[in-house]
Image (spheres, rainbow, N blue to C red):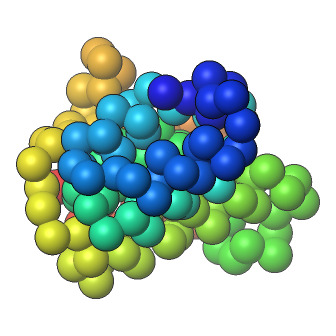
Amino acid sequence: MTRDEWESEDELWQFFETVTDAEELHLYADGFNWDTGVEELRRVTRHPLCDRGTALLIYWRGGPGWYAQYSDRAEIRNADEADGYDLSHEIERLIIQGRFATYRFHYDPTNDRGTDLTRGPSDVPQVRQIPREMFA
């Protein structure tokens, strides 16, 4: 479900507290409405049951190629963009640290519903490379 389908914020947070299977988190992330911000996705990636494939799905759908134009968070002027930048970097850190115990839900960023998300925006100069761990 997406945030706007919940009857209340309390119901949404209760969902995160009662998740019993990584698939619930994966399905939530897969159907997430990105127009609502990224706080819920941060809760998904921080959940003890979050799968590496789910974290990669969130990472690549969040557009890391866009954030690679910034060498530092201080360069970002838009608060929503800063939240996305923070989430992207947090997921990178968690994956590099080996935080995700499972990889049940294989995710291929070169074929996300027929789109290659590894090809960042061609008109955006990249000042940092996406870590190689994010491609596997």
Q: Position of residue 44 (x, y in %)?
A: 44, 55
Q: Position of residue 88 (x, y in %)?
A: 52, 61
Q: Position of residue 129 (x, y in %)?
A: 43, 65
All told, the count of numbered labels is: 0
Is 136 rendered above or below residue 89?
A: above
113 to the left or right of 82: left
Q: Position of residue 36 (x, y in %)?
A: 71, 36
Question: Could you tell me which residue is drawn at 42 percent across and 39 percent down?
Answer: 29
Question: Could you tell me which residue is drawn at 75 percent across and 52 percent down?
Answer: 81
In the rendered image, which quarter is residue 126 located in? bottom right
Between 106 and 132, the one nearer to me in the picture? 106
Residue 73 showing in the rendered view: yes
Is 88 rendered above or below residue 65?
A: below
Between 12 and 84, the one nearer to me in the picture? 12
11 to the left or right of 8: left
In the rendered image, which quarter is residue 109 located in? top left
Between 14 and 37, the one nearer to me in the picture? 14
Question: Could you tell me which residue is drawn at 81 percent across and 69 percent down?
Answer: 75
Between 63 and 50, the one nearer to me in the picture? 50
Is 100 rendered above or below residue 23?
A: below
| Image quarter of the C terminus | bottom left
Residue 67 showing in the rendered view: no
Farthest residue to the right: give it.
Answer: 77
